[in-house]
Structure formats: C-alpha cells, structure tokens
Image: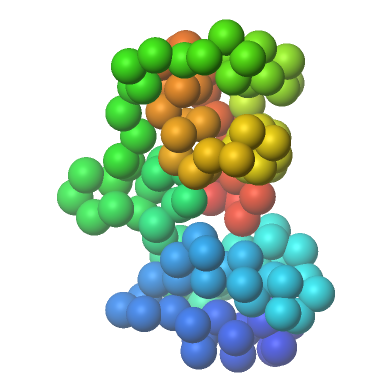
Amino acid sequence: MDEKIASAVREQARDGALSCIAAFRVAEELGATPIAVGEVTDALGARLAHCQLGLFGYGERKSVVEPAEEVAPELERAIREGLILGRLPCAVAWAIAARFGMPKLHVANAAEKLGVRIAQCQLGAF
C-alpha cells in the first residue's frame, strides 16, 4: 500500500468515508491515479462517499440521480456517442459535463432519462 496515499486518505476521510471530491484532490496533489486512491481507501476499510455523479454515498437514499425532465439533442448525442458496450464510462460523463459546462449530476440525470447506465467508476467503486 502506498503510504503517502494512505496518509492523505486518513487525513481527508470523515467518519470513515472519503468523498469523491476529496479522493480526486488526493490523486491530484500526489500525482496518483484516482483508481490507486480508491484501492487504498478500500484497503483502509473506508467508504467512498458523495459521488460527483450522484450515484452513491448519500446515506439511506444512496443515489441522488433523478431522470431529467428533458435532454437536449446535443447532450443526448454526446452521451450516446460516449457509450462503450452500451454503458457510459464515468470519465466520459465527466468529460461531457466539462464540454457542456454543466454539473456532473446533470449528465447523470440525462443518462438516467435516456435509460443509459454509468459504469467504470474512476475510483473503482463500480
């Protein structure tokens, strides 16, 4: 286990959980991959929480994703073009959010409306 990552995870974790945003901050600050931070978090027995796409880590409710009322044609096209084996990778969802200048949760809500599942968490949670 990488001790630098482990130390940073211990420092950033709250109540046995490391938020998605904190995990990415640790990765960036240490020059580590997000998956390495996720693996160390798991090895330490901590949970990942508050997924930036809203998919997990929100207490009893777990997910905060809700189908969007409408999905703009350009956003739908970007989501469908990003599919790999019928699913939208987490990293691609993030890239779409950046491209359209929208919160990551909005991309997840649009995907939910379209019946598209998000896969391949960058931290390894799913």
Is residue 104 rendered to the left or right of residue 86? Answer: left
Residue 92 position, x and y percent, is 69, 35
- Vertical placement of 51 versus 107: above or below? below
Is residue 28 rendered to the left or right of residue 50? Answer: right
Residue 83 position, x and y percent, is 69, 19
Residue found at the very far right of the displayed protein: 31
- Camera sees residue 40: no
* Image mark count: 0
Residue 33 position, x and y percent, is 76, 64
Q: Residue at x 50, y 89 (%)?
A: 11
- Camera sees residue 4: yes
Residue 123 position, x and y percent, is 61, 55
Residue found at the very far left of the displayed protein: 60
- Vertical placement of 72 versus 3: above or below? above
- Vertical placement of 9 versus 38: above or below? below
Q: Residue at x 39, y 14 (%)?
A: 70
Q: How is the image coloured?
A: rainbow
Q: Residue at x 73, y 15 (%)?
A: 81
Q: Residue at x 53, y 50 (%)?
A: 125
- Vertical placement of 105 versus 7: above or below? above
For the residue pair 47 and 21, the one nearer the viewer reads as 21
Quadrant holding the N terminus: bottom right
For the residue pair 54 and 56, the one nearer the viewer reads as 54
Where is residue 64, by image quadrant? top left
Quadrant holding the C terminus: top right
Residue found at the very far front of the displayed protein: 101
